[in-house]
Image: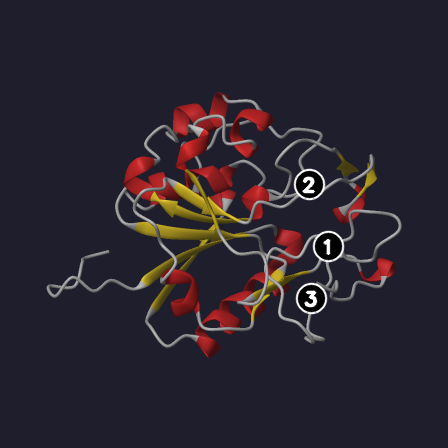
Amino acid sequence: MTPDPHGFEPARVFIGYDPREEVAVNVLSASFQAHASIPVQIAQVRLDQLKGVYTREPDPKQSTAFSFSRFLVPWLAGYRGWALFIDADMLCLGDIAELWALRDERMAVQVVKHQHDCEPGLKFQGMPQTPYGRKNWSSVMLFNCGRCRALTPEFVNSATGLELHQFRWLADAEIGELPPHGTCWWGCRSCHPSRRCCITPWAVPGSTTAAPCPNPSVGCRPARP
């Protein structure tokens, strides 16, 4: 992407792609564009476009094709500027300009710091649910790409899942926070047997909209804030 001569660049968004969530990816893309007041460039993190770069073998615990390839976003962005990664099973119900205004140059990445205590069991597509610290922090990540040079293809291919998802490649002081409520997204997930939808990285009070449910048999609906 060539920067605007006046210093203006579109917001860059990378959506995790899994063939089982293709409809959700397209709906999410359209929802970003429908509400945006600034130009948005949207790409997908797709394994079929990363052959020879992403060589990691599938992990039996990973629930989506992009469980680990999401951490290639700074590399895909050329380690320049800012880029947003977001899981596919969400909707944008607000203006991405509001999120873009929260960028903090002091931070390498900004996330919603969920306090998610889940129990072992099954989640998306019957995959195992694994409790761990900082779970779901990586569902929405606003990368300051130049400060994420540790995320090389070599590191992403070889690091453990916890090294990646618990942000062990950064000092804690470099992990900034995004507000958990009131801006853009509902997430649609089935990860806890007692709840049809679990973590909502962004919540809009009163909304009744959810991303297309990847597993209609569980009767997905929006979680409440």
Give neighbour class at mark 1: few <14, some 14-19, many 20+ (Cα, 10 Å).
many
> What residue is pinned by disc 2?
63
Report x, y in % for residue 154: 40, 24
Tell me if residue 187 comes above or below residue 75 in the rendering. Answer: below
What is the three-letter code of the residue carrying label 1? Arg
* Image position of 51 with respect to 194: above or below: above
The residue carrying mark 1 is 189
Q: CA distance from mark 1 to mark 3?
A: 10 Å
Q: Nearer the viewer, mark 1 or mark 2?
A: 1
C-alpha distance separating marks 3 and 2: 17 Å
Counting residues from the start of the chain, the first of labels 3 and 2 encountered is: 2
Quadrant of the frame with the C terminus: bottom right
Amino acid residing under circle 2: Ser
> SS at mark 2?
loop
- The residue indicated by pointer 3 is 212
- Pointer 3: residues within 10 angstroms few (<14), some, or many (20+)? many
Q: Residue at x 50, y 38 (%)?
A: 69
Q: Dot 2 surroundings within 10 Å: few (below 14), some, or many (20 or more)? A: some
Which circle's residue, 1 or 3, is located before the other in the chain? 1
Q: Is residue 214 above or below residue 137?
A: below
Q: Quadrant of residue 197?
A: bottom right
Taking the spot 30% from the left edge, 47% from the top edge, the residue there is 105
The residue under the point 57% across, 48% down is 139
Quick check: 181 left or right of 3? right
**Quadrant (top left/top right/bottom left/bottom right) for the N terminus:** bottom left
Q: Say which amino acid is labelled 3.
A: Pro
Q: Nearer the viewer, residue 210 or 131?
A: 131
Disc 1 is placed on an element classified as loop
